[in-house]
């Protein structure tokens, strides 16, 4: 992995912020001395400092003044208060060099950040403060994440590559248009919950058929993990792989017939479409 020589600051130290900090250090992408954090929870920042040796700053303005890359790792409902306070302090009007702003606040459009950061800023000033938006997912906590990334018009290819390097430390990343981000949220952002739902059903079925809960859970998790590895390695479509597993008149066909008769695939598609619609509603 490429090593970054930028000072990276985190506004917020929740689960995803902690995951990103841990991933950057474990992957040797960043030196601890180049990572900074600010959070209202002193307990959280003390833990991060003790665990990784990163630096804790006293307020969010100090993060922006000190760092080259600023990651807003806050909940969506906190974005407005955080940006309003920073804007009032005029920290965006006097940046010390170029700043790359990255938001991982779910469902929060780039234009919200532009409204605060670019207030009364010239085009030349905006070029020094590109804004990128990221939709990570919870497997990022175990370095197996899938992140969707988009950027505003002031972000250069180099800015986007820096963001990709940061995100690759905790999994995979794909660049999208911002208009695709509701779909990204519905598929990969909410996707782990769909997987866990399937696991729940398979485990309950196994228990109903007489298998112990412990064995049911282990067997189901291993089966799904192995199937995904097979999908990645075989480089053929899931449809074709499914057909290879399904013998005519066999047990798998009996199960799939029930799924097809109950339109399970269409229901899953409807569910993901509903998630995308809700994402659009939440961003207004």
Image (cartoon, helix red, strand yellow):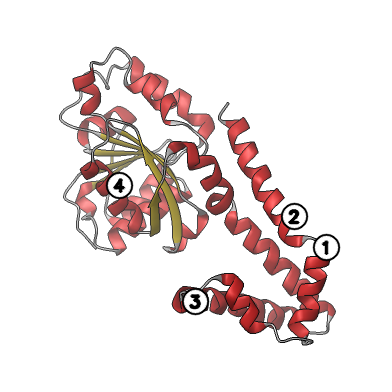
Note whether 274 is above or below 84 in the view shown: below
Q: Earlier in the sequence, mark 3 or mark 1?
A: 3
Res 72 seen here: no
Look at mark 3 in the image and give the residue it sits on: 229
124, 20: nearer the viewer? 124
- Between the C-alphas of marks 4 and 2, the distance is 35 Å
Separation (CA) of disc 3 from disc 1: 28 Å
Q: Residue at x 73, y 73 (%)?
A: 202
Q: Quadrant of the C terminus?
A: top right
Do residues under tags 3 and 1 come within 8 Å of each other at their CB atoms?
no
- First reached walking from the N terminus: tag 4 or tag 3: 4
What numbered label is drawn on residue 267? Answer: 2
Residue 159, given in percent of the width and then of the height, sits at 24, 41
Residue 91, placed above or below residue 184: above
- Given contact means CB atoms under 8 Å apart, are the residues at marks 1 and 2 in contact? yes
What is the distance, in whole Å, between disc 2 and disc 3 at their CAs? 25 Å
What residue is pinned by disc 1?
262
């Amino acid at each position: 992995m490429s090593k970054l020589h930028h000072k990276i600051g985190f506004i917020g130290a929740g689960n995803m912020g902690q995951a990103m900090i841990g991933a950057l250090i474990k992957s040797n992408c960043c030196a601890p001395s180049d990572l900074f954090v600010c959070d209202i929870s002193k307990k959280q920042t003390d833990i991060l400092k003790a665990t990784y040796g990163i630096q804790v700053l006293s307020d969010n303005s100090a993060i922006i003044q000190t760092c080259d890359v600023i990651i807003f790792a806050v909940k969506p409902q906190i974005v407005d208060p955080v940006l309003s306070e920073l804007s009032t302090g005029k920290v965006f009007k006097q940046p010390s060099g170029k700043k790359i702003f990255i938001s991982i606040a779910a469902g929060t459009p780039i234009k919200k950040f532009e409204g605060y950061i670019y207030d009364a800023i010239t085009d030349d000033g905006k070029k020094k403060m590109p804004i990128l938006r990221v939709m990570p997912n919870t497997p990022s906590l175990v370095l197996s994440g899938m992140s969707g990334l988009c950027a505003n018009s002031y972000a250069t290819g180099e800015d986007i590559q820096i963001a990709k390097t940061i995100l690759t430390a905790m999994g995979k990343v794909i660049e999208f248009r911002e208009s695709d981000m509701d779909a990204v949220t519905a598929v990969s952002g909410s996707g782990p919950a769909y997987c866990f739902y399937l696991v729940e059903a398979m485990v309950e079925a196994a228990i109903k058929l007489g298998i112990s809960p412990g064995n049911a859970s282990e067997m189901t998790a291993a089966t799904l993990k192995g199937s995904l590895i097979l999908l990645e390695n075989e480089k053929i479509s899931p449809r074709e792989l499914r057909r290879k597993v399904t013998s005519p008149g066999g047990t798998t066909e009996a199960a799939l017939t029930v799924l097809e008769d109950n339109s399970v695939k269409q229901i899953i598609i409807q569910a993901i479409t509903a998630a995308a619609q809700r994402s659009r509603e939440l961003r207004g």
